[in-house]
Amino acid sequence: MGRGRQKAKHTKVARELKYFSPDTNLSALERELGAKHSEEDPWAEYADKYNDEDSDDED
């Protein structure tokens, strides 16, 4: 008998989440997207360290 009330609550929450649009800080987004990245690959040292060139995976 309590299932209808529970389903109604879930439906209400799902509907609120579907139509909720939070405020977006466009200036912060612009700063983040406009940030200059370094040309050097930050993962290069790990690739060299963990990349196994003698891998037997290739047939």
Image (cartoon, rainbow, N blue to C red):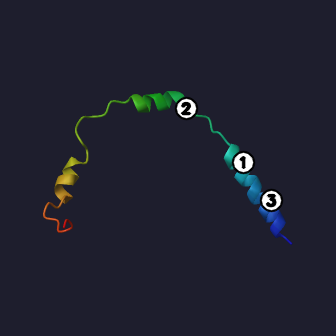
Check whether the beta carbons of the residues at disc 3 and disc 1 lie within 8 A of each other: no
* Residue at mark 3: 8
- State how far apart marks 2 and 1 are (Cα): 21 Å
Quadrant (top left/top right/bottom left/bottom right) for the N terminus: bottom right
Quadrant of residue 11 in the image?
bottom right
Quadrant (top left/top right/bottom left/bottom right) for the C terminus: bottom left
- State how far apart marks 3 and 1 are (Cα): 12 Å
- Which label's residue is closer to the chain start, 2 or 1? 1
Write the residue at 84% across / 70% down. 2
Residue neighbourhood size for the residue with mark 3, other residues' Cα within 10 Å, grouped as few (<14), some (14–19), many (≥20): few
Q: Amino acid at mark 1?
A: Glu
Q: Nearer the viewer, mark 2 or mark 1?
A: 1
- Which label's residue is closer to the chain start, 3 or 1? 3
Measured as percent of width and height from the top left, residue 4 is found at 83, 65
Residue 16 is marked as 1
- Which label's residue is closer to the chain start, 2 or 3? 3
Residue 25 is marked as 2
Measured as percent of width and height from the top left, residue 14 is found at 70, 53
Residue neighbourhood size for the residue with mark 1, other residues' Cα within 10 Å, grouped as few (<14), some (14–19), many (≥20): few
Measured as percent of width and height from the top left, residue 40 is found at 22, 38
Q: Amino acid at mark 3?
A: Ala
Q: Amino acid at mark 2?
A: Asn
Check whether the beta carbons of the residues at disc 2 and disc 1 lie within 8 A of each other: no
Measured as percent of width and height from the top left, residue 9 is found at 78, 58
Residue 6 is marked as none
